[in-house]
């Protein structure tokens, strides 16, 4: 603790001097939650990665539009004679914040570290068999069978210096589940655009621009200092932006968007988020086991009304449980059915439920944007076709274990797709519940043909064949009406007018891309 | 005498064990930390392995017994959320909460007594009645609303005071203080008012009632008959006798100021133990929640113990057990 305190005091002094020197280039950034740890492999979580991205680099990363761009690797391709091996050419002349040189040894070390016990990133690397340094700036990653999606899993896989890790005894990530911490929990040494100056958990983290950043001339790199403050209460967060105490906030509540954008000197940036919200229904038991009932429920949801009234226009209604960034998405799949009460009632009558039935809707109340209000709206909409819905809204810590237990007949869930590929959706939400697949599919839906197709995606290297299989699986899901899609969430960042910054679909600001007017 | 003290101490420990037990029973209904810990990609086997490793499958009394055994060795475990030792987290955040509580207590005490005396003296005046009726707002408005209102007026509209955080703090041998910097002092004002407003109205109403009571006493009439100035009567004689019960109540309220700080700290992003507790509840961070509840429990038990012992020292009838005999 003492070490932290001295660092803190130094940080305060440093930030004071810095802010007087270069106040115009300081960005004061606030969002709802803090990073959980500075160890880049210990937590696979949004706000943790967002902060780590400022300090550490991955081999390749997603830019502000969500496209994959080179980072510490400049080129990558599967070997022509062996599709099981991906070869990465590393960037020359990259140094860590402490001056050490980045080379292939560090990549081998970091990937192995991310696969070690206690790492929260190891599921993303489950297909990796071996990592080898070919020369000082070339690395081969060998997978068990071909893995066309390997690079998509590396965008949050940060590179650490082997020498620094050895010197500070942080050869493996601290296992959060076992209550461990290590030197890397509070200390960093990355190659990123910013270096850590001071950190006080849940209070303030100060970063300063890395003078030797390799991307200095590639990217605008106008920000010289970042002061990051988590502000939990949304009213306070908005007030801090309105009063000019912070320059940019994430997680602007929808009811305050008008207030922010109408304030002179402030603006709201908007982008579709990589997260789809939908209802799951029991596919094998009870009234919802009947396809016609699920279809009736699907067309009884008035998605436009939810967008207009509940979401204040801040949503993107959809007919498929897949955000538009994902490989496999088509405008045809995205099209949602017209709201049609007569047809829905007809389907209910055909299924023998003209008088409706009783069902409980399980809903989280602290996870997605206006989650409980969407469920309340759905209760009314289902009531119009005779389905008597009891709403059971709970905090996420109770909601998710309950629906994973498989006891819910009707529930709300949201899904983000970090790999930007349909397989991620299929693997967790569609595959039968067996072993380590289908962990988020409590609907009872199980189709061995579909399961086989899902597994085949993992090693299919011919992209055309692979895309055809993806389309087939989507057709099967849509015909089954396995889920009732609602909408894709929209991200809103509030910021000062003087800042040019695109809203990133993964909700991750990369400040080297920010420019000032 | 010693026996009574020992008995009181024993009772205090018993209360603390009860606090721990009740909080443990509550945790069953807060939810399951496993999904927060593992993330959405975890497999069923990983989930079960973690539940087993955390001992969440054990019967409640075994979990409770383990917890009590560890606490008796001053081991509060590590947070599920950040894996940091809970004892360190609390020690690091306690200064923020205690400074805020101190400022609120002073604010409540000073303005409470001043306005209480004023309304007692000017019982029929317009200002006095206005203060009295507007004080109802302080009692009836919820804390978070007062906080948001203050932020809106003083931070957003007037831009005088910061809306969140502690400002710059100075490190003094393990204790961080906001008292030594301008931004630190400015940051204390809004949360201090928010947290102290309820206590202030309470103290004001208590002071007023006590003062009116005292002003009816014979010795006040006698003082007036002696021709003493109003000033001497009110502040020399009446106020002194009013303050004894007021100080007792204010001291007892200190515990609830620390406990109520949860809401104020959340609204103002005040980095104290209350904010830490709220985060722990959202994450189902059982080690942090149990340590915090035990801390607040200890605080209340200690204050009550001190009050009890003071009464013992003051009132010989309790000490000698005479009250009991008289009752018989």
Image (spheres, coloured by chain):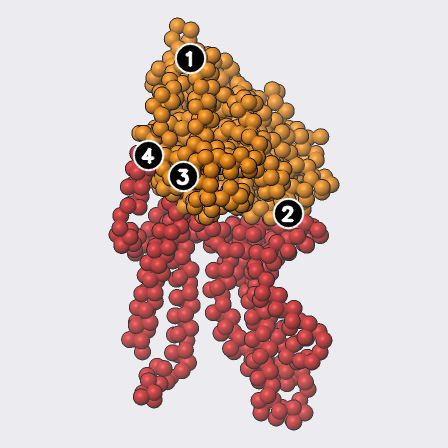
Chain colours: A orange, B red
Residue matched to label 2: A239
**Whole-percent x and y of residue B309?**
38, 74
Q: Of the numbered discs in the image, which one, if any, rests on residue B82?
A: none
Residue matched to label 4: B44
Residue matched to label 1: A461
How far apart marks 3 and 4 lie (CA) works out to 28 Å
Residue matched to label 3: A287
Quadrant (top left, top right, bottom left, bottom right) of the C terminus of chain B: bottom left
| Mark 2 surroundings within 10 Å by alpha-carbon count, few (fewer than 14), some (14 through 19), many (20 or more) | many
**Whole-percent x and y of residue B317?**
37, 85
Q: Is residue A469 left or right of residue A18?
A: left
Mark 3 in CB contact with mark 1 (< 8 angstroms): no
User: N-terminal of the two: label 3 or label 1?
Assistant: 3
Name the chain under label 1: A
Compare residues A469 and A218 and report the one nearer the observer: A469
Mark 1: secondary structure: loop
């Amino acid at each position: 603790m003492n070490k932290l305190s001295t660092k803190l005091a130094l940080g305060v002094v440093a930030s004071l001097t810095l802010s007087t020197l270069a106040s115009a280039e300081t960005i004061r950034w606030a969002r709802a939650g803090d990073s959980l740890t500075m160890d880049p492999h210990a937590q696979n979580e949004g706000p943790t990665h967002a902060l780590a991205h400022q300090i550490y680099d991955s081999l390749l990363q997603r830019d502000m539009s969500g496209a994959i761009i080179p980072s510490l690797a400049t080129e990558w391709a599967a070997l022509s004679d062996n599709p099981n091996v991906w070869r990465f050419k590393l960037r020359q002349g990259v140094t860590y914040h402490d001056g050490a040189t980045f080379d292939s040894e560090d990549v081998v070390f970091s990937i192995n570290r991310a696969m070690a016990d206690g790492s929260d990133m190891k599921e993303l690397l489950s297909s990796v068999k071996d990592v080898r340094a070919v020369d000082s700036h070339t690395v081969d990653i060998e997978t068990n069978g071909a893995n066309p999606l390997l690079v998509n899993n590396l965008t949050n896989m940060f590179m650490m210096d082997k020498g620094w890790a050895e010197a500070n005894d942080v050869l493996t990530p601290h296992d959060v589940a076992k209550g461990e911490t290590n030197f890397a929990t509070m200390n960093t040494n990355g190659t990123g655009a910013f270096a850590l100056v001071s950190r006080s958990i849940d209070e303030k983290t100060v970063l300063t621009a890395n003078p030797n950043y390799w991307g200095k001339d590639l990217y605008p790199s106008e920000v010289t200092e970042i002061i990051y403050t988590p502000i939990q209460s949304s009213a306070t967060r908005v007030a801090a932006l309105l009063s000019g105490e912070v320059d940019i906030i994430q997680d602007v509540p929808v009811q305050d968007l008008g207030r922010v954008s109408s304030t002179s000197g402030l603006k709201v940036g908007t982008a579709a988020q990589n997260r789809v919200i939908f209802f799951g229904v029991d596919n094998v038991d009870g009234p919802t086991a009947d396809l016609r009932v699920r279809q009736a429920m699907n067309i009884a949801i008035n998605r436009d009304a939810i967008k207009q009234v509940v979401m204040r226009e801040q949503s993107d209604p959809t007919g498929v449980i897949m955000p538009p960034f994902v490989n496999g998405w088509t405008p045809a799949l995205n099209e949602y059915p017209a709201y049609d009460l007569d047809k829905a009632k007809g389907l209910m009558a055909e299924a023998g439920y003209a008088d409706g039935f009783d069902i409980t809707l399980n809903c989280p109340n602290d996870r997605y944007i206006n989650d409980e209000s969407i469920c309340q709206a759905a209760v009314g909409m289902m009531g119009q076709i005779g389905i008597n819905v009891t709403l059971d809204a709970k905090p996420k810590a109770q909601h998710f274990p309950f629906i994973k237990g498989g006891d819910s007949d009707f529930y709300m869930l949201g899904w983000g797709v970090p790999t930007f590929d349909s397989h991620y959706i299929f693997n967790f939400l569609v595959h039968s519940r067996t072993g380590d697949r289908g962990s988020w599919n409590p609907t009872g839906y199980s189709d061995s043909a579909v399961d086989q197709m899902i597994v085949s995606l993992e090693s299919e290297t011919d992209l055309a064949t692979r895309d055809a299989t993806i389309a087939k699986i989507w057709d099967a899901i849509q015909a089954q009406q396995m889920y009732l899609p609602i909408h894709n969430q929209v991200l809103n960042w509030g910021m000062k007018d003087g800042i040019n910054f695109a809203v990133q679909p993964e909700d991750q600001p990369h400040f080297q891309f920010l420019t000032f007017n | 005498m010693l026996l009574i003290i020992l008995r009181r101490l024993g009772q205090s420990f018993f209360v603390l064990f009860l606090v721990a037990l009740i909080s443990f029973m509550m945790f069953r209904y807060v939810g399951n930390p496993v999904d927060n810990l593992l993330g959405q990609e975890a497999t069923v086997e990983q989930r079960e392995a973690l539940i087993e490793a955390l001992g969440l499958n054990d019967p409640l009394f075994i979990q409770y017994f383990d917890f009590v055994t560890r606490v008796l060795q001053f081991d509060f475990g590590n947070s599920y959320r950040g894996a940091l030792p809970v004892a360190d987290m609390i020690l690091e955040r306690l200064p923020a909460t205690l400074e805020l509580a101190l400022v609120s207590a002073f604010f409540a005490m000073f303005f409470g007594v001043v306005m209480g005396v004023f309304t007692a003296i000017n019982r029929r005046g317009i200002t006095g009645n206005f203060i009295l009726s507007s004080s109802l707002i302080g009692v009836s408005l919820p804390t978070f609303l007062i906080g948001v209102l203050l932020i809106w007026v003083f931070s957003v509209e007037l831009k005088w005071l910061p809306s969140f955080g502690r400002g710059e703090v100075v490190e003094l041998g393990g204790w961080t203080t906001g008292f030594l910097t301008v931004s630190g002092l400015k940051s204390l004002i809004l949360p201090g008012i928010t947290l102290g407003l309820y206590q202030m109205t309470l103290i004001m109403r208590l002071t007023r009632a006590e003062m009116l009571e005292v002003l009816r006493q014979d010795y006040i009439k006698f003082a007036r008959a002696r021709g003493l100035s109003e000033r001497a009567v009110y502040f020399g004689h009446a106020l002194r006798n009013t303050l004894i019960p007021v100080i007792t109540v204010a001291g007892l309220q200190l515990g609830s100021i620390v406990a109520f700080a949860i809401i104020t700290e959340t609204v103002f992003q005040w980095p104290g133990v209350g904010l830490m507790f709220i985060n722990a509840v959202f994450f189902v961070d059982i080690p942090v929640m149990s340590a915090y509840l035990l801390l607040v429990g200890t605080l209340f038990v200690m204050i009550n113990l001190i009050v009890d012992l003071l009464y013992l020292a003051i009132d010989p009838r309790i000490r000698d057990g005479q009250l009991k005999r008289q009752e018989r």
